[in-house]
Image (spheres, rainbow, N blue to C red):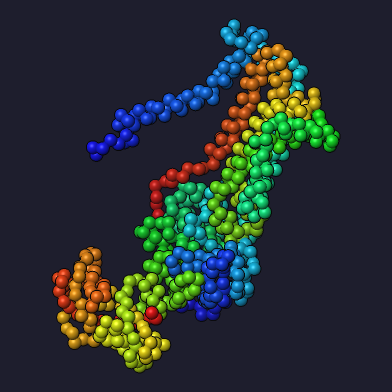
Amino acid sequence: MSAASPNLPGTPGALAFGAVRLAFGALVVAFLLLPLVAILPLAFTDSVFLTYPMSGPSLRWFETLATSDAWKRSIVNSLIIGSGATVLSTVVGTLAALGLRRELVPFSGVLRSIFLLPMVVPAVVLGVGMQILYARMGLASSYLGVIVAHAVLCVPFVLVNVSGSLASIDPALEKAASSLGAPPTAVFRNVTLPLAMPGILTGAVFAFATSLDEVVITLFVAGPNQTTMARQMFASLRENISPAIAAAAFVIIVLTFALLLVVKGASLFRPQRNKQRPQQT
Amino acid sequence: MPGSAAFIQFENVSKAFGTAKVVDALDLHVGQGEFVSLLGPSGSGKTTLLMMLAGFEAPTGGAIHVDGKRVERLPPYKRDMGVVFQNYALFPHMTVAENIAFPLKMRGVGKAEREARVTRALDLVQLGHLQDRKPAQLSGGQQQRIALSRSIVYEPKVVLMDEPLSALDKQLREHMQLEIRELHRKLGLTVIFVTHDQGEALTMSDRVAVLNRGKIEQLDTPSGLYDRPRTRFVAEFIGETNLLAGTVSARTDGVATVVLANGGSISCAAPDGFAIGSPALVSIRPEMLHLGNDPAVLNALPVTVEDDVYHGDHVRVHLSCQGQRLVAKAGRRDVVLPVGSQAFASFNRDDCTLVAP
């Protein structure tokens, strides 16, 4: 054991490596979280400017959100459009994931790529395209139009999540159900769907969050009546940089986190404890 | 061999994946209430055969009858067979009781009767106290017993088991072998059991089908397979054997004289076939070889002791007989000859058999 083995636990080499790893991890986390730390406290400022130093704490900007017609309207719009887009994209994305699961459809690889395209195509391109299309179809400046546009963006998130949870289902489970007398619809209802549910819920949360902060496409396809929170923030950023934006951001983040907690909480109550009790046979 | 009428019939069944023939024009008849094992190395087609019977694979040729009906076009859920999978395949999101109730629910059995039958099925495997647990909270052996009771609770025509014990440790495996055997006897189940473990096949089955390259090499009782292997593959696959090459020089009913390639002649029990002049292999199990100094007994081979290996309950003696290596198993009461000594390895006419080379 005279040769240097830097990765043995307890040796100076291992400790140094561990410290570097920890520092790097902390840096990445800081990089991700610092912007939030910078903006969020300003939601509670009593000043009319979105700048530091804060002169004193106050909830006046949340009051603005709740009382100003434009902001109230935008919150309601965001909820309507977000819910619609979530339901639509979750249904479409889940069906797509099921259809593409076994690669039985010809060109399923190509199809999957097409479904994932909205993740990579620049939002501006999609937005312009949709604007032209919607003008022809008479969908411009309608709730349905914005919901469909958002759903297009959300489908990839649902598809990826549901595909992931479908892939983790042991095929023997569905075979077992079938051998036990379950026709295909019963196998789907009793086995496939419940086991895919965590992925479907996670996909739905991603979809809602995506819709909530979508700006670019909304700018192209939404009329003044469909102004969402994100768009309202964008608009007021150009006019006057008021701390109401920070308050709105706070609301969006809290909403997203709450949803995430609900989904994670739901999956926590499912007993996934694989460590069994003392073996007794 | 209970139930002689063919309850399950494979007639000329083939299965090819692309150009690879996994099952090749195979015939197999299984009687009602019989416990038949499909034994073979991986790739021999045993699991494919089971999957065709369960309905997860369609044969590319031939017919499968169960209880007088052709089944190869029926989907799995209409076949009324219980399948026990290698990894148990318990539904992780259902409790033990819900798992066992599932096939009853699919058959429209009412709630009260369902509960009664679940309780009975759980009692059968002595796990009634675990009915509200989730599968992940059970040990491997418990999960296996739940899977077993789920596959018999609806009294299927046949229970198919695909290497159900391979994930368990040795002690538990042997315990479960006895338990499955007992359930089979108590309930009169017809069982098709796939395994690559010859010990398991020999201890559990009424009959064993040894598969090799998509064909059945031999279908026989465990003792038939061990004592009278028909082919070289079976002789070598089941247990351990010494094979001596030679030519049949004389034969009467049931007995053949074989002149060995390296000199000497042997009198040997012989099945039909093996006409005079045909090449044959004499198969002698290691425990049938006795070491001694008397060259006058029947079937005595001159040998040199090369090595003794102690195995606790027996000693393996490695021998060389004119350049060919042989193995003998000596019991603890047998005389152990020192390494390097000359001796004669002898065996009875009925303790060896002829197999095709």
Which image quadrant is residue A106 in? bottom right
- The one of A85 and A260 positioned closer to us in this rendering: A85
Q: In the rendered view of the protein, which quadrant contains the N terminus of chain A? A: top left
For the view shown, which residue lies furthest in the top direction? A55
The total of numbered circles placed on residues is 0
Q: Residue at x 58, y 63 (%)?
A: B56
- Res. A79 in view: no
Q: Foreground residue, B236 or A120?
A: A120
Q: In this view, does B172 lie to the left or right of B296?
A: right
Q: Which quadrant, please, contains the C terminus of chain A? A: bottom left
Estimate the x, y position of residue A174 in percent, counting from the top left: 58, 55
> What x and y, as percent, mark residue A3?
26, 37
In the shown orientation, is residue B143 left or right of residue A99? left
The structure residue drawn at horizontal position 71% and vertical position 16%, both measured from the top left corner, is A238
Q: For the point 50% across and 59% down, which residue is it?
A: B85
B320 shown above or below A84? below
Identify whether A183 is placed above or below A37. Answer: below
Please state the horizontal and vertical placement of residue A212, each as a whole percent of the image.
68, 28
- Is residue B304 visible from the viewing direction of this image? yes
Residue A22 as seen in the image, left or right of residue B347: right
Question: Considering depth in this image, is B14 or A212 the residue closer to the camera?
Answer: B14
Rendering coords of residue B43 (x, y %): 47, 65
Q: Which residue lies at the image location 80% right of the left edge and 23% below the top edge?
A: A224
- Give left or right: position of A134 versus A96: right
